[in-house]
Image (spheres, rainbow, N blue to C red):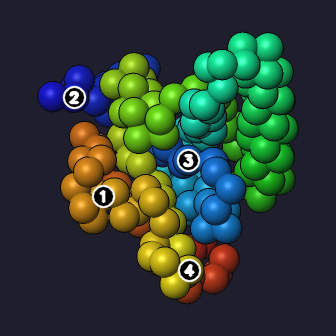
């Protein structure tokens, strides 16, 4: 069971959550979420999740890898945040988490009761729409808030018109 959403309460603003990863469709989701946040006086939250590695036997290597992944995550988030600032004129919140992506999305939604909509974008690859979108279709993720899935064929103009 998910905590009550507070985004409509006084002093709160509805938040749109977009997942930052290495998929090409990620930019579509961020563009749409930023546009919706701007048009509805909401907030955009960007989350970057560092998946756990398999370096238990090499503790020194694991610490170096984690530090490098944190650095990469920060740089990636900042790159997307800069695009959002430039294109939408809003300041996004940024989150870096370590763990399994679906689990960390669930945790953030539970922690931040203003998050009301998760925005994902479908990929156009032959192997399917992308792991997060596929997990929704297979009900493996079953997110406790509405999920908006942006089709891969939408242009920037289409996204602007729909948001």
Q: Does residue 11 appear left or right of residue 79 in this picture?
A: left
User: Dot 3: few (<14), some (14–19), or many (≥20) neighbours within 10 Å?
Assistant: many
- Marks 3 and 2, the one that precedes in the sequence: 2
Q: Earlier along the polypeptide chain: callout 1 or callout 2? A: 2
Mark 2 — residue?
Answer: 2
- Label 2: which secondary element: loop
User: Neighbour class for label 2 at 10 Å: few (<14), some, many (≥20)?
Assistant: few
1 and 2 marks in contact (CB < 8 Å): no
* CB under 8 Å between discs 2 and 4: no
Q: Secondary structure at mark 1?
A: helix
Q: Residue drawn at (43%, 56%), measured in percent from left and top?
A: 132
Q: Position of residue 64 (x, y in %)?
A: 82, 21
- Report the disc number at residue 136: 1
Name the side, left or right, on which 105 lies relative to 136. right
Query: Residue 19, labelled with which disc?
Result: 3
Which residue is at the front of the view, 65 or 130?
A: 65
Q: Quadrant of the N terminus?
A: top left
Residue 7 screen position, x and y as percent: 36, 32
Q: Which residue is mark 4?
A: 125
Measured in 3D between alpha carbons, the distance from the residue under mark 3 to the one under mark 4, in whole angstroms, is 18 Å
Q: Is residue 154 above or below residue 20?
A: below
* Circle nearer the viewer, 3 or 4: 4
Q: CA distance from mark 1 to mark 3?
A: 14 Å
Residue 66 placed where, x, y %?
74, 24
Q: Nearer the viewer, mark 1 or mark 2?
A: 1
Query: Do we see residue 55 in this rendering?
Result: yes
């Amino acid at each position: 069971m998910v905590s009550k959403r507070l985004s409509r309460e006084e002093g709160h603003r509805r938040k749109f959550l977009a997942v930052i990863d290495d998929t090409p469709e990620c930019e579509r989701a961020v563009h749409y979420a930023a546009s919706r946040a701007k048009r509805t006086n909401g907030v955009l939250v960007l989350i970057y999740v560092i998946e756990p590695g398999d370096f238990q036997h090499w503790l020194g290597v694991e610490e170096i890898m984690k530090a490098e992944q944190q650095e990469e995550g920060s740089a990636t988030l900042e790159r997307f945040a800069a695009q959002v600032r430039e294109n939408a004129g809003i300041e996004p919140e940024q989150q870096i988490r370590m763990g399994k992506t679906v689990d960390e999305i669930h945790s953030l939604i539970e922690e931040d009761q203003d998050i009301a909509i998760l925005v994902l974008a479908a990929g156009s690859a032959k192997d399917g729409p992308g792991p997060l979108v596929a997990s929704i279709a297979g009900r493996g993720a079953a997110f406790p808030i509405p999920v908006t899935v942006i089709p891969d064929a939408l242009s920037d103009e289409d996204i602007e018109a729909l948001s």
